Image (spheres, helix red, strand yellow):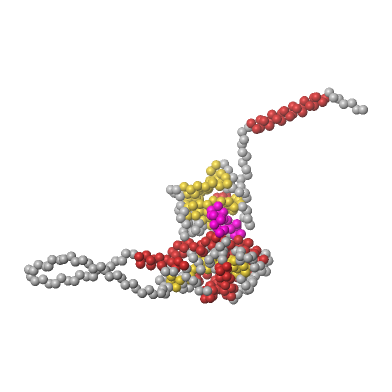
Amino acid sequence: MVERDCSSIPEALSNTGARRRRLIAAATTLLALPVIPSLARAATILAVRTWPADEYTRVTLELDRELKAEHFTLDNPHRLVVDLEGLQADAALNQLISKVRPDDPYIRSLRVAQNRPNVVRLVFDLKQPIAPQVFTLKPVADYQYRLVLDLYPKIAQDPLMAMLNKQSTNPDVDDPLARILEDISRNSPATTTASPAPAPAPQAPGQQPPARIALPQPAPAPATPMPSTPSRRKRMVTIALDPGHGGEDPGAIGKSGLREKDVVLRIARQLKTLIDNQPNMRAYLTRDDDFFVPLHVRVQKARRVRADLFISIHADAWVKPTANGSSVFALSERGASSTQARWLADKENAADLIGGVNLGSHDKHVAKVLLDLSTTAQINDSLRLGSAFLDEIKKINRLHKPRVEQAGFAVLKAPDIPSILVETAFISNPREEELLRSPSHQQKLAQAMLAGIQQYFVANPPLAHIADAS
């Protein structure tokens, strides 16, 4: 039997207790020290971009982590101040200064400085007072975290007035601005010319002229109403053209680098020129430059200008480069007509996530109601319009499908406007990408679309707006 030395046990316990007391004392000392926050690693700027346009200017900072930003505006002179927490001033951020263009409608200049440790201050010197929106976006598609600064004018220009200001008045066309001007002139105070008084009879020499007696003036005879004649004016037809994507959202990109947002804007501009040259027709672009427009805003713009048709122009892409041909889509309330149509609708509806929408800047419930008001009549008219487009486009390009397909495209949900989405070609197909790059092919596409519009109106003459009735 092995004997144990029990005398060492109390000593070991004493040493353990001493070590424990020392650890407790050290922990207490640490807790008593003032808490000094450790500086987290500063975020890294991956890219800086600006998107100046008449409607608003967007400034985007892409980073590897989310930032906290605070902002305020100053007057006399007008400035926007943005404090970015968790950032250090560096060369990448200073690149933003050089990206401010002289023709930017809102930004005159930009200053960047380290305001305090871990906080960078941006000061935008402005050309006019603004109503800024500052928000962050989570990573999506090819983008990491983004801080977005949208500089809107304090008084936004109404789309209808913007279009009317560019529209020349034609007296033979029933145009809203022409009617307003005519009403003003008709209701202005009439300036009547008095009939000349009869010359007094010659008087004999020395004879006093007879005293004038004030006679009551006869009441003016009531004006005889002119017989009403039917107006010979023809109503101005408005076509809303919607170049897809834009700004932060490039859309599909071809193998050679051609971006969907660029080519569809070129086609839309050419189509607008063709439409504007037609009698009693005019076109309105939902975007006329490289900037992003949310899907629901595109619909609202078309309704605001009282468009008779809405045509959204795109360039398709598919996972296989062999896919080719043009397609036309209309809205569906009962599911997509094919798997590809459903996939494409989901991709196009995700444009708001990629382009970047400030969800806090508008009432999402109102937007949802607007997009849920589509009617069967609108869809039927859209199908007829789409068929007319296919008849014309097939003359210059192969059709991917010989019929109008349907899916739940958010941009087609104007409840009172026939609306279609045209996929001009597959930008993911190398041969069709080259066609889309060609100005002559772009012109052919625009001419085919104009012919489709004219074919539709021959079979479906535009009705008078309710507000146009006199």
Q: Which residues are magenta?
A: 350-369
Within the magenta stretch, is there residue 292?
A: no
| Foreground residue among 250 and 243 | 243
| Residue 404 shown left or right of residue 234 in the figure | right
Nearest to the observer: residue 453 or residue 415: 415
Q: Quadrant of the N terminus?
A: top right
Q: Estimate the x, y position of residue 61 in percent, counting from the top left.
A: 57, 52
Q: Main secondary structure of the magenta part?
A: helix
Q: Which quarter of the picture shows residue 444? A: bottom right
| In the depicted structure, whether residue 109 falls above or below residue 423 | above
> Where residue 105 sits in the image (x, y, percent)?
48, 56
**Residue displayed at 47% across by 70% down:** 464
Seen at 44% across and 69% down, the residue is 469
Residue 129 location (% of width, % of height): 46, 52
- Residue at the (41%, 74%) spot, across then down: 230
Between residues 214 and 202, which one lies in front from this camera angle? Answer: 214
Q: Is residue 368 magenta?
A: yes
Q: Is residue 331 visible?
A: yes
